[in-house]
Image (cartoon, rainbow, N blue to C red):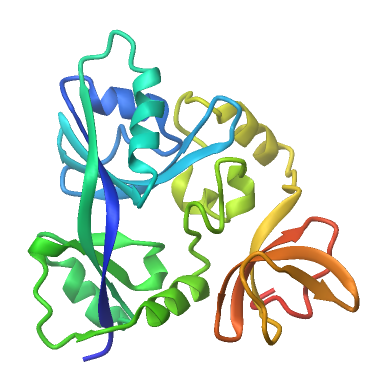
Amino acid sequence: MTGFYVEMNRDVLHVSGTDARKFLHSQLANDVASLKIGKSLYSLLLEPTGKITSLLRVRCESDERFVLDCDAGFGEFSASRLTRFKIRIKCEISSGAQKFVAVRGLSADNCADYLARDSALSAWRENDCAVDFVANDFVAGDLRLGSTEEFELARVMAKWPTMGIDMTTDSLPAETGLTDCAVSFTKGCYPGQELVERMDSRGATAPQQLRLIRAEAGASAGAPVVLNGEEFGIYTSVCQEFALALIKRSADSRSIEIDA
C-alpha cells in the first residue's frame, strides 16, 4: 500500500436555502450551476477588484445545501465577503472549523479506490492523486501516518498554493496557477470576472507568477530568489530542495524552474 495521511484543520462554510446554488454560482469564479449532488469542485472567491478573497472547495450535498472548505483562518473572512452580496437571497451562511484528513502519495489505482468511498473528497488537481476526508469519516486501514514535511513536499511538488502563504488577498488569479481548476471561462458573471476575463482574452501575463523551482541551500519563505546576483522573485514555500516562488514576469527562471 502506497501513500500516507495527515490530519489538518480547515475552515468550513455552510450555505443552505432555496437560492443557495444560484447565489454561489453568481459569486464564485467556477461553475456551481452544473455541480452534481455528491460532487465537489474548487473555486476562487474574488473581490470586485479581481483580487482573491479565498480558495474554496465547494461540495454539493443537495440542491439547497452546500459545504465549502478553505484554508484555516479564511472561513469567517469568506463568509463575510459572501454575506455582503446576499441581497434578497433566500439562503443562510454560517462558518466554523473542522478537522480533515489528507491522503497523499497514492498511486493512480489507490487513489481511485479511495475516491470510490462515499465520504471521499477529491483534492488538488485530478492528476495529483490526492484525496481528503472529514476526519470523523476516515478509516486509516493500511495507510501510515505521515509527517507535516511529507505533506508539504507533496503540496509544493503539486504546485498547490496555500492561502496566506503562497497567495494573499492582494493576489490576482493569474498569479496563482489555479485558473485551470478554479475558474470557469464559460459561466455567467461574478464579482471580479472583468479582470480575469480581460487578462485571459488578451493573453496577458501577471506581474508575477507562482512557479516550482529548485531552492538554493538555506533558502526560506520570504527570502528573495537570486540568480547570478539578480533578484527576480520571492520564496513562498520551501521544502527540502524544492520551493514555490513568485517569479517576476520579466525574469528568465528556466535554469531553476522545474518542468519549465
Image quadrant assignment for residue 24: top left
Image quadrant assignment for residue 31: top left
Q: In the rendered view of the protein, which quadrant contains the C terminus?
A: bottom right
Query: Is residue 184 shown left or right of residue 50?
Result: left
The residue depicted at 51 percent of the width and 72 percent of the height is 156
The residue depicted at 9 percent of the width and 63 percent of the height is 137
Question: Which residue is most to the top?
Answer: 88
Query: Is residue 143 shown left or right of residue 75?
Result: left
Query: Is residue 172 shown left or right of residue 119?
Result: right
All told, the count of numbered labels is 0
Q: Nearer the viewer, residue 80 or 20?
A: 80
In the displayed structure, 240 sits above or below 26; it is below
**x, y (%) of residue 142?**
13, 88
Image quadrant assignment for residue 44: top left
The residue depicted at 90 percent of the width and 75 percent of the height is 229
Q: In the rendered view of the protein, which quadrant contains the N terminus?
A: bottom left
Question: Which residue is most to the bottom?
Answer: 1
**x, y (%) of residue 160?**
48, 63
In the displayed structure, 44 sits above or below 87; it is below
Q: Nearer the viewer, residue 180 or 85?
A: 85
**x, y (%) of residue 125?**
41, 62
The residue depicted at 29 percent of the width and 83 percent of the height is 146
In the displayed structure, 215 sits above or below 188; it is below
Query: Is residue 59 shown left or right of residue 167?
Result: left
**x, y (%) of residue 13?**
25, 39
